[in-house]
Image (tube, coloured by chain):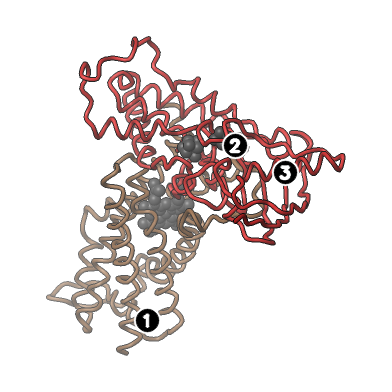
Amino acid sequence: MENTINLTLKVWRQNGPKDKGRFETYKVENISTDSSFLEMMDILNEQLIKENKEPVAFDHDCREGICGMCSLYINGRPHGPDDDVTTCQLHMRKFKDGETVTIEPWRAAAFPVIKDLMVDRTAFDKIIAAGGYVSVSTGGVPDANAIPIPKVDADEAMDAASCIGCGACVAACKNSSAMLFVSAKVSQLALLPQGRVEAKARAKAMIAKMDELGFGGCTNTGACEVECPKGVSITNIARLNRQYLAARFSE
Amino acid sequence: MSNFLTASIGRKFIMSISGLFLMMFICVHLGVNLLLLFDDSGELFNLGANFMATNPLIKVMEPVLGLGFVVHIIWSFLISLQNYKARPVGYDKSNAAYSSTWASRNMLVLGALVLVFLVMHIIQFFIPVKTGGLEATMIDGVEMHNTYALVAGLFKSSVLYCILYIIGGALLGFHLGHGFWSAFQTIGMSNQYWLKRLQCIGKIFAIVVAVGFAIIPLYFLIKF
Ligand code: HEM
Ligand code: SF4
Ligand code: FES
């Protein structure tokens, strides 16, 4: 048995980076509760095209929760009302019939709006380019027993590496801070022998870039961790703080 | 080290170190103040206050404490301004309460209210003690200020001030409920095991501080 719902959508529309932007209200009907939020957006866009109106621009790619491209601040939360999912994985059964759904882009000085709900997240790429790598080739995959790594470290590195660079942490943070993202990228390398060598310099360079790009600082509210679709832990931020301070004090 | 003081983590480091220092002061201050409860003649508290006023270590620490407050307050505004600028356009609908506590989002508001309390507190107690307008008392042959009379006098005579001091204790409690574990997180002294522990210790510490300070005016309010 299939259930359907009708919704009122309050969507942010903005013609370009320089435009002031405004909310527009649309109605969508007979939306299957089995569909995903992005499928619902597709239905809205079909409807707008038929009415000869400009469709709503929004980001998406894999639609299976692994690429980090989809965004959207839905009803006051990044990726909407479900926990630990991206917007492409968000089901319409999370909404009630007749509900008004407010859809906004990520809000941060470092993520300027390109159009409607799309924001420019190249700032993340710039942070990675500043130091989020190992600068010498460490060869192919080593034999599992060649460099023994404690299970606890391997698990923590793996958890940090699950960050998909979506930017929900920045969107959730009241300071638009990128600390959870940076800490995940720093931790996934710093916990392993190949990455440990450059750990301090990496932390310093990536934080300098983060500050330069206009992200805010961390005040430990913890909102990022709650809203991260991959559950990246704020203990990574403690590790980043530790490494950054060690780097600065050993200058 | 050039831009350490303006880097995001550098600024937070200053907040954390000054905050940790202020928390140590709060512990000492609370310890001495609680002497008010255990001797209604005031001798015990006067001895404690006199020890604090004459101890050379405390004399040295007094200007450091003042500096600690000034640094903590100035940096709190710097940090808040920088973080405010990082989001020029806000959200129309935001469900921030789902993912973070009210206190963690409003440390500046709580801090500013603590500051208002602090100004009142300094005018009422610190300035009279320092400018010497207090009556003297003799304990064990030593002449000292009758600080007890000043404090007990205020609380016995004014219900309003009792209430304001209780509110002051509560405000500080909320500030520290987030501030305690946050200070350790900021300097990197936290991990997957210690995060939860520090949050728990922080809650207990905040309750002890809030109840500890509030119980003093309550005692005078109820007993006298
Ligand atoms: C006895 C008084 C005070 C104590 C013991 C205290 C303690 C602390 C502690 C431990 C922190 C956490 C530091 C960190 O997150 O790293 C903190 C943060 C903070 N304090 Fe205070 N504080 C006091 C008074 C004030 C005053 C008077 C103000 C401002 C007007 C203030 C404003 C702030 C702000 C805005 C933060 C948050 C900073 C951030 O999270 O980035 N505090 N405080
Ligand atoms: S830390 Fe989480 S919320 Fe932030 S970019 Fe990575 S996956 Fe997204
Ligand atoms: S579209 Fe790839 S994670 Fe949502």
Of B205 and A2, nearer the camera is: A2
Give the class, few, some or many, for how many residues have Cα within 10 Å of label 1's Cα (few <14, many ≥20).
many
Give me the C-alpha separation between circle 3 and circle 2. 16 Å
Q: Which residue is mark 3?
A: A43
Find residue B205 and report its image quarter.
bottom left
Of B18 and A64, nearer the camera is: A64
Q: Give the numbered dot on residue B173.
A: none
Q: Is A166 above or below relative to B175?
A: above
Q: In the structure shown, which secondary structural element does the residue marked by tag 2 occupy? A: loop
Residue at image point 20% right, 81% down: B39
Give me the C-alpha separation between circle 1 and circle 3. 68 Å
Q: Earlier in the sequence, mark 3 or mark 2?
A: 3
Marks 1 and 3 on same chain: no
Q: Nearer the viewer, mark 1 or mark 3?
A: 3
Confirm if mark 2 falls within 8 A of ligand 3: yes
Which chain does brown denote in the image? B
Report the amino acid beneath label 3: Ile
Report the amino acid beneath label 1: Phe
Give me the C-alpha separation between circle 2 and circle 1. 60 Å
Left/right of residue A126 with respect to residue A47 in the rendered view: left
Which chain does red denote in the image? A
Q: Is residue B121 visible?
A: yes
Give the class, few, some or many, for how many residues have Cα within 10 Å of label 3's Cα (few <14, many ≥20).
some
**Extreme front residue here?**
A1
Residue A110 x, y percent position in the rendering: 60, 34
**Extreme left residue here?**
B140
